Amino acid sequence: MLRTKALLLLAVTAVVLAGCNGVGEAETSNATGNTPADTTPPSPPTGLTGAAAGSTGANLAWSASTDNVGVTGYIVRRNGAPIATPAATSFTDTGLSAGATYSYTVAARDAAGNMSPDSTSVSVTTAIAADTTPPSTPTGLTAAAAGSTGASLSWSASTDNVGVTGYIVRRNGVQVATPAATSFADTGLSAATTYSYTVAARDAAGNISANSATASVTTGNTPPPPSNSAGLTWDAVTVPSLNGYRVYFGTAPGTYLQPVGQGINVGNATTYTVMGLASGTRYYFAVTDFDTLGQESSYSNEVFKDIP
């Protein structure tokens, strides 16, 4: 029995010695032997900025957050919903709609899963997408003669993804008008002449459709002047200050129905037909020219015509 007690005492002594420090006090330790859990969240990201990246993207950037252990990444939210978890302090959002506004926030997180509050929000409006789609080609182009010097055109409206702003009318391949409506009256044509027309549509972005099918028209013959008229022609005056011509006529030589300076102003034309003359009467005619200062020349040589 004494021997057994000695052995037990030695064992207890060994345990006590193993559990004592240099001053005879017991050491303390965590019950599990682990480091205390990290419950401290990172600081909120600051300086969040956003800028449109074309019509379908947004570039975001912010200042780094701090943490008692270390920031492992960030959570980007668009309109309140998480969309990305970048490790860097920038992010490019893609696949957005053109001309739309989006709101973004960013939060930081650490390895323990602690998350910071959201940053202040920033809004980004994407650019409006460039319009590169041309309108549809005009259809149903028709052309009809309008007397001896004109043509009337009409066609069906074109369509466009944004909107048609007008049309381009070409006569014999040369642009002659840009009407907004789906019709056009061409004037100043030559009598008994055939003309070819096409029409193209355009939009506000400058996109132009293909030309329509061609429509041709032949103007009518020039009708003969009525019997109670007199057709006049004269040689052009070639002076830099020329402003136009005036036609005078009357029923006696050298005596005209129009006072000086009040003859019929025919502009710069060198032909004119006087209409509505009395039957059975002889009329006398003369022409003057006038300059930009209003100074008028003397009468031209006089001609006459008997109205039947």
Image (cartoon, rainbow, N blue to C red):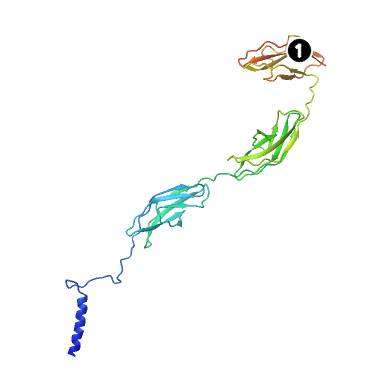
Crowdedness of circle 1 by 10 Å Cα count: few (<14), some, many (20+)? few
Dividing the picture into quadrants, the one containing residue 146 is: top right
Q: Is residue 278 left or right of residue 269?
A: right
Residue under pointer 1: 303
Q: Is residue 57 left or right of residue 203?
A: left
Which residue is rendered at x = 44% and y = 52% of the image? 91
Vertical comparison of 197 with 83: above or below:
above
**Residue 106 place in picture, x, y as percent:** 41, 54
Vertical comparison of 57 with 260: above or below:
below
Dividing the picture into quadrants, the one containing residue 153 is: top right
Report the quarter where the N terminus lies. Answer: bottom left
**Residue 126 place in picture, x, y as percent:** 50, 47
Nearest the viewer among 168 and 78 is 168
**Residue 240 place in picture, x, y as percent:** 62, 17
Q: Is residue 293 left or right of residue 63?
A: right
Which residue is rendered at x = 19% and y = 80% of the image? 13
Label 1, secondary structure: give it.
strand
Vertical comparison of 236 with 110: above or below:
above
